[in-house]
Image (spheres, rainbow, N blue to C red):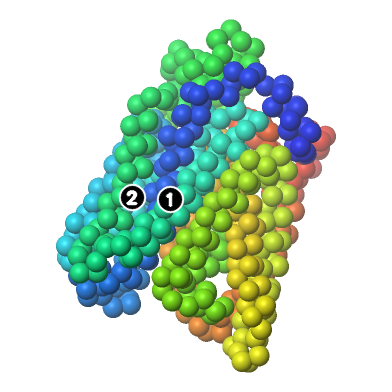
Amino acid sequence: MANTKPSLTKYIHAIKDSPREIFNRHLFLAVCAFAMGGCAKGWDEGSASAISQLPSFKHRYGLDDDRTSNIVSLVNLGAGVGALLSFLLNDRIGRIWSMRIYQLVYIAGSLVSCFSSGHLAALYVGRLVAGLGIGALTVVCPMAIAEIAPSTTRGLMTLWFNVWMLSGQALGIFTVYGCSIHISSTTDLQYQIPWFTQTFVPAISIALSFLIVESPRWLLMNDKHQQYLSALTHLRGLPSTASYVDNEFNGMLSQIEDRNSGLGHVSSIQIVKETLLVRSNLRRVQLTLVAYILAQMSGANAITNYLPTIFGLVGIQGSSVKLYTTGFYSVTKLVCCIAASLVLVDVVGRRKSLMIGATIQIVCHSYLAGYLNFYLTDSDTVSKGASDAAIALIFIHALGWAIGLYSLPYLFGAELWPNRIRSFGGALSQCFHWLFYFAITKATPSMLENMDQWGAFVLFAGFCFAAIVYTYFLVPETSGLSLEEINKIFERPWYRLRLPLDQTISDE
């Protein structure tokens, strides 16, 4: 039985005990093709609000603050709808074709936005359509990666999706920054180029998808055993007679047979009922939804969305300087996310990563709350060192965010669900995430104002502390476990979820 107390030594042994052939170019190419789906979300987050502030965009559309806010936030609303509807396609046409369609939807929405030429209604439609694609991609891409990755590196590979999100965010910010400097504000190209270039990565992802194979688990759930075996041997780089392939096949097959979890002719209504009425699945629903609530309420997205404003509060002035610093902040998050995927999530484990990350966030929020409280009441006596420390802690906060509450909710949403309801479970959790994100984005400006800026950071620190308590008592450790072994964890009572899988328990 797999041990769920991860350590560097055990992780190294697990990697060494695995056949070297399973880490091959076919697997890496497949993971990369799906992970690139994260670029759409990141690029939009990095560029949308910045585009709306470009002089050429303001002149063309003549927007007030409320309409500008709608342009930025409509994508989140569309993403919530797209995420929920995605389960209707994910299980019917497969992971690859679903991903292709969602990328095309996103490209179409981006092009409509790009060439809306001052027509606000067309721009709104483009933003909603782009959101539909983004939301659906956040469901199918992490799910597909979790299904094709070996259990020893599932956390690392699933977080490639987050790495591409942050890469897209940085690219989006610096693209807008470059256009704001080098392209005249009298031409529409200043805002059209950032929207047009964000279609490049999705197009590359679609092209790569024709070089990869379908998810073996999806093939097996659809009774395509021969195609399943061919896909699995292709991804693992091993012959069908290899014991590693045989063990993986038998593990998946036994779960499907024992739990009747193949898709067959199961209706969508039956899948919804199974997700919401079966106790073990309700535990999964609770875990994923709470993870996204804590992630949003930890304040990280509020900092990201309103970073220029926050930088202004701590002493960074000038729109170009703020935009450049915001881009550098995104690069910092990207580097931290790469480090988290390579070192922490599979080595230290999900639980410890969450608690370490939330602790770092608490320290940063606490200092920023104290700094802003003192700054707003007596700004003349605030030292440069205190302001420099506040700026540094904003960047250190990115480390805590990347280690825990940024990366792991996506991983949980992809890996915790049993085969038959994985698509709907992922769609449900992402739909909730996007709609909650939409609400928080709308509420953050008034919250910062009504709580005198510093009070909001106290609230964020409180939710980070709640995340630590929740993780300690209720979050299971899934590092190193196969997707089939994870199911055994949720057969336990809720108060025993945090126990290692190999520990003897009695379900009272």
Could you tell me which residue is drawn at 32 percent across and 65 percent down? 180
Q: Amino acid at mark 1?
A: Gly
Give the image location of residue 10, x and y in percent.
77, 32
Q: Nearer the viewer, residue 74 or 222?
A: 74
Tag 1–tag 2 contact (CB < 8 Å): yes
The relative height of residue 328 versus residue 220 in the rendered view (above or below) is: below
Element on which disc 2 rests? loop
The numbered mark at residue 294 is none
Q: Quadrant of the C terminus?
A: top right
The local crowd at label 2, few if under 14, some if 14 to 19, many if 20 or more residues have their Cα within 10 Å, is many
| Position of residue 382 in the picture relative to residue 198 (left or right) | right
Residue visible at 44% across and 36% down?
34
The residue at the far front in this view is: 182
Compared to 220, does 300 lie above or below?
Answer: below
| SS at mark 1 in the image | helix
Q: Quadrant of the N terminus?
A: top right
Question: What is the crowding at mark 1: few (fewer than 14 residues within 10 Å), some, or many (at least 20)?
Answer: many
- Residue hosting label 1: 168
User: Horizontal placement of 349 versus 77: left or right?
Assistant: right
Q: Amino acid at mark 2?
A: Gln
User: Which residue occupies 52% across, 47% down?
Assistant: 162
Question: At 17% from the left edge and 65% from the top edge, which residue is drawn?
Answer: 119
Q: Residue 408's spot in the image, x, y percent?
A: 60, 48
Q: Position of residue 74 (x, y in %)?
A: 34, 62
Of the numbered discs 1 and 2, the one sitting upstream in the chain is: 1
Where in the figure is residue 26, as x and y percent of width and height? 48, 23
Above-or-below relation of 42 to 504: below
Residue denoted by label 2: 198
